[in-house]
Image: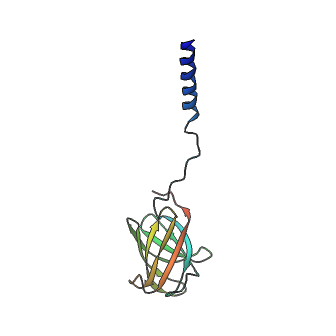
Amino acid sequence: MKSFRIYSLLLLALMAIAACSNDDDPVQPAPASVEGTWEGKYGNGTKVPDWFMGFEIDPNGVIHELSEDGKKIGKGVWTISGDQFMSTYHNDIPYNSNYSLKATFIKSQGTLKGTWGFGNKDTDGGTFELVRKEVTNKR
């Protein structure tokens, strides 16, 4: 009778272990890089961002400014160090001007929040916030 109890307890323990399998839905990891398509809003000066802003950030350090309909209207370069994103680009349409961006890449939210400026200055234009629309899996 004593051995029956021991075997029963062992059987219950094995069933409990088997019930804790790894077949649960996997948790999606936070984005590891800034590569992809981003859309959001920018504001002039101290105004709340309310104008469309979009970019396609390529893995080779190239960035394309996008219009609201997804057309490429500018091109430049980008870098990231830790969570600090930096970019300079030339807008072809409609302004034919150079701009700079400085942002914090908030991986857990999939956002870029920062400031933009004219030429090589990244703070004299206003603020912006972008959200990743898709992730490119290029490596």
Instruction: Farthest residue to the left: give it.
Output: 81
Front residue of 66/53: it is: 53
Pick whichever, 137 or 127, lies toward us.
Answer: 127
Please tell me whether residue 81 is drawn above or below residue 11 in the rendered image. below
Q: Quadrant of the N terminus?
A: top right
Q: Residue at x 52, y 64 (%)?
A: 110
Please provide percent x and percent y for residue 131: 55, 69
Residue farthest top in this picture: 1
Q: Residue at x 56, y 47 (%)?
A: 26
Residue at 42%, 68% in the rendered image: 61
Residue 22 drawn at (x, y percent): 55, 39
Q: Estimate the x, y position of residue 9 in percent, counting from the top left.
A: 55, 22
2 in relation to 89, above or below = above
Q: In the rendered image, which quarter is residue 87 located in?
A: bottom left
When asked about the image quadrant of residue 54, the answer is bottom right
Residue 37 picture quarter: bottom right
- The colour scheme applied to this rendered structure is rainbow
* Residue in the picture at 58% in, 25% down: 12
Q: Note whether 91 is above or below 33 in the view shown.
A: below
